[in-house]
Structures are given as C-alpha cells and as structure tokens.
Image (cartoon, grey):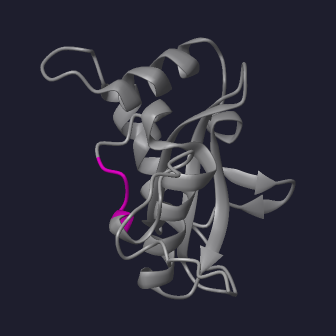
Amino acid sequence: LTLGENKRFIANDRHKHGNLYVYVLLNPCDKSIFYVGKGTNNRLSQHFSDARQYDGSGDSNEKLSEISDLLKQGYTENDIGRIVAIVDTESLAFMLETLYIKFIVGYKQLTNLQSGQYSGLFRSKDDWQLRSGFDIPIIVN
C-alpha cells in the first residue's frame, strides 16, 4: 500500500508522528465507508491479505466479503483503504476511531462489530435524545 506517489504505507516505514493510526475502508464506487479501524504497523494491509484468502465459507464476514468483492472488481488496496489520522498514543487512536464511527460515519452503515473502544463517551450520529450525564439543564433567568 502507498499513501501517495513515492510514499510507503505506514506498515513499512514509521511515520515521524508515530505508528498508530485510524483508517477507513471505503467502496470506491460511491465513496461510502464500510469499516473504521485503529491500527499499528501492518494492520490495514492485513485486511487485504485476509480478504484474498476469504472464500465465504464458515462464519459470514461482511468486511472481508466486501473487500474481496472490490478486489475482484479490479480495485486496489489504495482505492479501498485510507488512513484518516496518525497519532502518538493508543488512547487517542481509540478516541478518534470511536468519534469517526459514532459521529462522522454512523455505526449503522458499517460492518464493524463494535461501535468503538470508547463508544460510551460519544453520542451516535443523529442521536439527539436527552441523555443523563451528557445534557446539562439550561436555566433561563
């Protein structure tokens, strides 16, 4: 994988800002994001290796099925995988992953099995119900 011309994917070279990152998998046809993850080193690349070996038997795996289908259509890893943030700490990576899942993309359209490590700290996209601990009563004088 490459991030652009003459840049190696983070799995092979440590980025000057750290080697933790948040990434998305997207469908190049309509640019819809179907997975958000946090990774180090070759985590993003591993999805493509797994998808190439995925034969659809056994337990269903929507993420691998989607990647496999896109690769068979001729799309490349660079077309499907994108790093959206490079961070220095795992805690920040988890927070950004959760923010991306719950607010930017919305969990319902993703193939993620979880809504993020710190999902309880963020409202979901389009969730404006009053929540204890989140909403502060407004007092008008």
Q: Tell me the magenta residue range.
A: 114-119
Residue 63: x, y in percent? 39, 31
Residue 113: x, y in percent? 29, 43
Indicate left or right for 17 with 20 as reference: right
Q: Residue furthest left?
A: 58
| Image position of 58 with respect to 128: above or below | above
Indicate left or right for 49 with 18 as reference: left
Q: Quadrant of the C terminus?
A: bottom right
Is-magenta flag for residue 124?
no
Provide the major secondary structure of the magenta segment.
loop
How many numbered circles are shown? Answer: 0
Q: Residue furthest right?
A: 5
| Image position of 12 with respect to 30: above or below | below
| Quarter of image, res 105 | top right
Q: Residue at x 57, y 48 (%)?
A: 24
Q: Residue at x 57, y 45 (%)?
A: 126
Indicate left or right for 100 with 68 as reference: right
Q: Residue at x 42, y 83 (%)?
A: 91
